[in-house]
Image (spheres, helix red, strand yellow):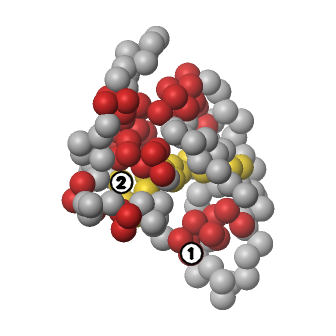
């Protein structure tokens, strides 16, 4: 079972730490299950992995998804040392670098706001796509 904890401290830590890149092996999913192989092979938050050649993808769930709000909680905008950047700043940097960023599909339906509340560059994850990604044999999943 995958559990999610607040991503705020993890965002800062992952940007300053190196992450091993994952295998570039093709997914063995049958053609009828996946129309086009997903180019994503790593589900995490890290520029280091991207720099090493991986294709990171961000999936923000529960309190971690609050980072994607245009009006986030104070913890999302409080700067961490030594970078001086806030967790939401780190998320925005990853988005600007082309990292796909989504909130869990159940995040918005359980809130008093909709898609308009999210910052630019953040979408709502498609459960079927995430399921195929998680099932891919070459995925390294980092959960916080």
Relative image position of residue 52 (x, y in whole percent): 63, 36
Above or below residue 109? Residue 41 is above
Q: Decide which of 40, 14 is in the foreground and name it.
A: 14
Please indicate, yes or no, whether residue 47 appears anywhere in the rendered image: no
State the residue at coordinates (38%, 64%): 110
Instruction: Identify which residue, 6 or 16, lies in the foreground.
Output: 6
Q: Which residue is mark 1?
A: 128
Q: Which residue is mark 2?
A: 122
Q: Earlier in the sequence, mark 2 or mark 1?
A: 2
Residues at discs 2 and 1 in contact (Cβ within 8 Å): no
Q: Position of residue 48 (x, y in %)?
A: 58, 31
Please identify the quadrant where the N terminus is shown.
bottom right
- Is disc 2 placed on a helix, strand or loop? strand
Q: How many marks?
A: 2
- 65 w.r.t. 124: above or below: above
The Cα atoms of the two marked residues, 2 and 1, are separated by 18 Å
Quarter of the image for the C terminus: give it: top right
Residue beneath the point at 65% across and 50% down: 3
In percent of width and height, residue 7 lies at 51, 38
Whether residue 14 is visible: yes
Q: Is residue 87 left or right of residue 4?
A: left
Say which quarter of the image contains residue 93. Answer: top left
> Does residue 68 lie above or below 31 as drawn?
above
- State the residue at coordinates (45%, 66%): 105
Asked if residue 114 lies left or right of residue 12, the reply is: left
Residue at image location 67% in from the left, 33% down from the top: 19
State the image quarter where residue 78 is shown.
Answer: top left
Residue 133 in the image, given as x and y percentages of width and height? 63, 64
Q: Nearer the viewer, residue 98 or 12?
A: 12
């Amino acid at each position: 079972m995958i559990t999610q904890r607040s991503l705020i401290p993890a965002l800062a830590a992952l940007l300053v730490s190196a992450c091993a890149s994952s295998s570039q092996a093709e997914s063995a999913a049958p053609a009828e299950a996946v129309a086009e192989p997903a180019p994503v092979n790593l589900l995490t938050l890290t520029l280091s992995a991207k720099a090493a050649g991986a294709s990171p993808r961000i999936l923000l769930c529960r309190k971690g998804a609050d980072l994607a709000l245009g009006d986030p909680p104070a913890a999302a905008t409080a700067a961490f040392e030594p970078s001086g950047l806030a967790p939401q700043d780190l998320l925005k940097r990853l988005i600007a670098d082309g990292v796909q960023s989504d909130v869990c599909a159940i995040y918005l339906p359980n809130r008093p706001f909709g898609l308009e509340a999210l910052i630019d560059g953040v979408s709502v994850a498609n459960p079927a796509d995430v399921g195929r990604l998680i099932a891919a044999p070459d995925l390294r999943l980092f959960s916080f």
